[in-house]
Amino acid sequence: MSAPAIRISALTKRYGGVQALARIDLEIGQGEFFGLLGPNGAGKTTLISALAGLIRADSGALAVMGHDVVTDYRNARLKLGVVPQELVFDPFFTVREMLTFQSGYFGIRGNRGWIDEILHRLDLSSKADVNMRTLSGGMKRRVLVAQALVHRPPVIVLDEPTAGVDVELRQSLWQFVEQLNADGHTVVLTTHYLEEAQALCGRIAMMKAGRIVALDTTANLLSSVARKLKVRAGRPAAALALGGAAAGEWAEFAFDDPADIETLLARLREAGADVLEIAVGEPDLEQVFVEVMRRA
Amino acid sequence: MPDPFRVSPFIGFRTLFHKEVLRFWKVGFQTIAAPVLNALLFLLIFSHILERRVTVHGDVTYTAFLVPGLVMMSLLQNAFANSSSSLIQSKITGNILFVLLPPLSYRAFYAAYVLAALLRGLFVAIGVWLVSALLIQTPLAHPAWALTFAVLGGALLATFGLIAGIWADKFDQLAAFQNFLIMPLTMLSGVFYSIHSLPPLWQKISHFNPFFFMIDGLRHGFFGQSDTSPWLSLAVTGGCLAALAALTLALLARGYKLRG
């Protein structure tokens, strides 16, 4: 049986009085598109840094494609590509020089063909010989993605890759990352844009204060919160009297089973609410996130 | 298309070395030409003022005496500046990440930074020597000794620069290293004078300054004459290099201030 793309066992990390990671256990299978969500300070970046060997955990173990990140760090790092959160670059060099150096650091020689391909796929070909200093923020972000892919890693971690990025680039970046996932790459994503995580990730872990407080498929997480029937009534007071939550001109009623809709509408008619318009609101990840964080 | 997983650690070292060399080469006016000009100005001013007032080794003129001192001073200062500034810039801008994420060993990291810094130091040193030839021809009595001290001294200061770059979190901490340690040790090492011209107490104190041995050793390479035995200078320089290299490798192996 093949090793999981990422295996994290009893991982802890403390910074002074702050427990950044509190015995994290997590397995991410090969080929997954996995979301790692949480508020600022939840421990997402610390977890990614430990995985990439940028920090040393106090205890526990991490492995990438079966290679321990401490005892077998060479193979673990070869299998992992990380797109960092900060927009870092080296102002001395051009885009192509950066990618050629990055390729060399991984011990790869003669990688020009693949570098040309990722430049093309990230729409960077025209900027290949341009100094990093002169690129826009969005272009620098693309170079970071290209650098993470230069050694063709099977596992790619994107730490908030679309923070501060315009809509067009976000769309093209996600298309590219989805294609990588379809090609068999495991993708781990952290983002504050929950709609992106909902659309892309098959499975999601939510973190708070260094702990994983929810871990399930995106579908299961979404089904864990009630859907909403939204009603605009001629007599709103009558609708609210039946337990609806006010949302502007609308009253919202939570329901689990679609059969409940008919029952609810019958009760509204009986109460003389004068229903003018109805809409069914699908649950979204933001609702799930808020609920999970509230409970945790 | 190459198999991306057929990798060689040597390529990693070679790439980092190449990157570090390009980094100073691209700004050669600042990193090579400017220090050569500085040394030339020192040579012009000090030789003009002191040529007939200071006696050094036997028949060696003061201006000739000054040349190896300035060559070594420039070499040491630029080797230190290269490794320290490159590392701290990478730390502060965050692009150190690019060399921490790949599977580069700490030995490859050390070797690449030190050799690139040494190379810059040697470029500057050769530049100072060549430009000084416009004013005075200095003999090269023992080229092997001169090369040995140039390489060991440059490697020593490049290593020291790496320690400073690892330790410092801010540019002013690095400047403190340069202004309060490197500069005084260089100026008080006998670049501009023979320690035989000093009072006995200062002669003794000079023997605790490793920079004195590096400069005196290089002078032996040039003139075949020096204030102290070249073998003692070699032992001190080599010993200091070995000790600092061991410390730096230990810091890098632990990931001190690089991997949290």
Image (spheres, rainbow, N blue to C red):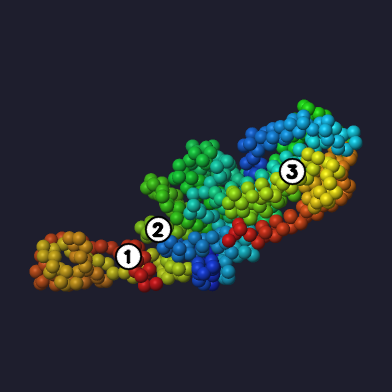
Q: CA distance from mark 3 to mark 2?
A: 56 Å
> Residue A171, relative to residue B192: is it above or below?
below
Q: CA distance from mark 2 to mark 1?
A: 14 Å
Q: Secondary structure at mark 3?
A: helix
Instruction: Estimate the x, y position of residue B153 in percent, counting from the top left.
Output: 77, 46
Front label number (3 vs 2):
3
Identify the chain of the residue marked 3, using the numbered disc in the image: B
Residue placed at 52% from the left, 58% from the top? A155
The answer to whether marks 2 and 1 sit on the same chain is yes
Q: Which residue is mark 1?
A: A287
Instruction: Estimate the x, y position of residue A43 in percent, counting from the top left.
Output: 48, 64
- Name the amino acid, label 3: Met
- The reply to whether the C-beta atoms of the residues labelled 2 and 1 are less than 8 Å apart is no
- The reply to whether the C-beta atoms of the residues labelled 3 and 2 are less than 8 Å apart is no
Horizontal side of A287 relative to A57 (left or right) equals left
User: Can you see residue B53?
Assistant: yes
- Name the amino acid, label 2: His
Identify the chain of the residue marked 2, using the numbered disc in the image: A
Q: Residues within 10 Å of mark 2 (few under 14, many from 20)?
A: some
Q: Which residue is mark 3?
A: B187
Q: Judge by depth and name the residue closer to the eye, B11 or B34.
A: B34
Q: Which residue is mark 2?
A: A192
Instruction: Estimate the x, y position of residue A175 in percent, counting from the top left.
Output: 42, 50
Residue placed at 60% from the left, 57% from the top? B258
Task: Determine the residue located farthest toward the top in the rendered image.
Answer: B134
Q: Residues within 10 Å of mark 3 (few under 14, many from 20)?
A: some
Quadrant of the image occupied by residue B20: top right
Q: Quick one: label 2 or label 1, which is nearer the N terminus?
A: 2
> Residue A100, relative to residue B9: is it above or below?
above
